[in-house]
Image (tube, grey):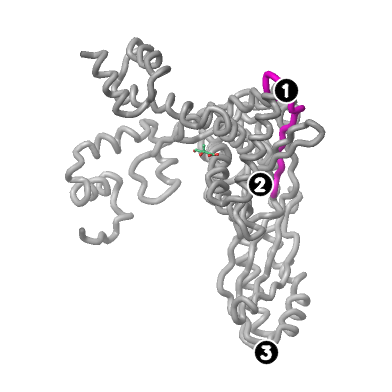
Amino acid sequence: MKLVEGFSKLSKQEKINFLKDNYLSDFPEADTILHQYLNEDVKLQRLHDEFIENTLTNFYLPFGVAPNFTINGKNYIIPMAIEESSVVAAASKAAKFWGQRGGFKATVIGTEKVGQVHFTYAGNFQELNQFVDEIKSDLKLAIKPITKNMEKRGGGIKSIELRNKTEDLAHYYQLHCTFETKDAMGANFINSCLEELAKVLQERASVQLSSNLEIVMSILSNYVPNCTVKAEVSCPINQLGATKEEAEKYAKKFLQAIQIATIEPYRAVTHNKGIMNGIDAVVLATGNDFRAVEAGVHAFASRNGKYKSLTHAKIENDVFTFWIEVPLALGTVGGLTSLHPLVKLALALLQHPSAEELMKIVAVAGLAQNFGAVNSLVTTGIQEGHMKMHLMNILNQFDANAKERNQAVEHFKTNTVTHSSVVEFIQSIRS
Ligand code: MEV
């Protein structure tokens, strides 16, 4: 394959032609598929084209909703964008279950965002320390043009701290800065502030310091351990089963599942993956950066040196409590939130939440998802629900009609779903 020059300058059709000629010669459906996914509304398509570079078409994800969530006494229908079957169903089921037991309670613990200017300095630490102290107020003043609007909304830069990292890496220091970005996720705001801070730091250092200070880079951190939210459900144990014995047995097993995910990283990763099924789906539907959230959440899960469950459970005085604490840097203004029509709709569905309210909703979606997964795992097993959806997917592949679907659902109530068993069944009823 030859390398391509100036690909980005080609028109969309020219790009497609290039791919067809060079990579997709054995894939005759390419043109049809790429065009099928384009939107006929030219303006809408242009909007999507311009989100990224070299756009060829759109990549759809299902956009669904999980109804019946009660969070701090308020009712929500939660929008979810996700390709995995059973996730929305599990969230909806958990919402209903906990809705009948007082609903979810959620509290924002902190909203502090972080950004760092990374630099090297070969001179004396005391001299650097004094210098940073001296110029701190000038640094804040220098970024006023960037921060003044954010300050009007109650945000801005909160602190600038010199951190000495030379024990880990020779000559390496940071300006570790904290920010409050209110309803914005704040990535652009923080990065603009940091780049300006770095500029001023460099300028002043070249005049005031006796040794060379060199900026390496300036960037926000997606690790936000002080931007966290807690969501919780609780009920008397006896509400967890038909009889006292059943309820106690269930609660004990549920607790054991959480303990296993707390002490065993192999299980913790899968356990937290289930939580992220809920979190990512809402983060994506509301136009937030799920990669940033993922990176921050997993770092948080291993903050004590071992990767652990993000959810916790306890039984005290015959009350079962299940909760999550997660870092979530989210925005409800700026970025995609004001550009993507479906994101706007998702935020409208949620009644235009503030970033803090969205943090609560997303944490609840994660907790609900985890409840659904662990509940299945310690009772019926996870495959029962999955296989029902799997059956539907295979039936769709074979364009099964309503009668065939009903026959298949009936048949697979007592027979194991595998791809080949479903195919055989369809063939048998069709022949
Ligand atoms: C599948 O997407 C998620 C689960 O594996 C989560 C879990 O095991 O807790 C079911």
Stretch of the chain drawn in magenta:
228-243
Is label 3 in contact with label 1 (beta carbons under 8 Å)? Answer: no
Residue 244 circle label: 1
- Disc 3 residue type? Ser
Along the polypeptide, which appears first: circle 2 or circle 3?
3
What is the crowding at mark 2: few (fewer than 14 residues within 10 Å), some, or many (at least 20)?
A: many
**Alpha carbon distance from label 3 to label 1:** 75 Å
Give above or below for 130 relative to 419. below
Along the polypeptide, which appears first: circle 2 or circle 1?
1
- Disc 1 residue type? Lys
The answer to whether residue 337 is visible is no
Disc 2 element: strand
Residue mark closest to the camera, 2 vs 3: 2
The answer to whether residue 117 is visible is yes
Residue at x 61%, y 71% (from the top left corner): 118
Q: Position of residue 128 (x, y in %)?
A: 71, 81
Residue 326 circle label: 2
Quarter of the figure with residue 101: top right
Q: Position of residue 356 (x, y in %)?
A: 70, 42
Check if residue 75 falls in the magenta segment. Answer: no
Q: Is 37 displayed left or right of 145 in the figure?
A: left
Give above or below for 213 relative to 177. below
* Quadrant in which the N terminus appears: bottom left
Disc 3 element: loop
Disc 1 element: helix
Which residue matches tag 3?
Answer: 210
Residue at x 66%, y 58% (from the top left corner): 304
Quarter of the figure with residue 431: top left
How many marks can you see? 3
What is the crowding at mark 3: few (fewer than 14 residues within 10 Å), some, or many (at least 20)?
A: few
Check if residue 238 falls in the magenta segment. Answer: yes
- Disc 2 residue type? Val
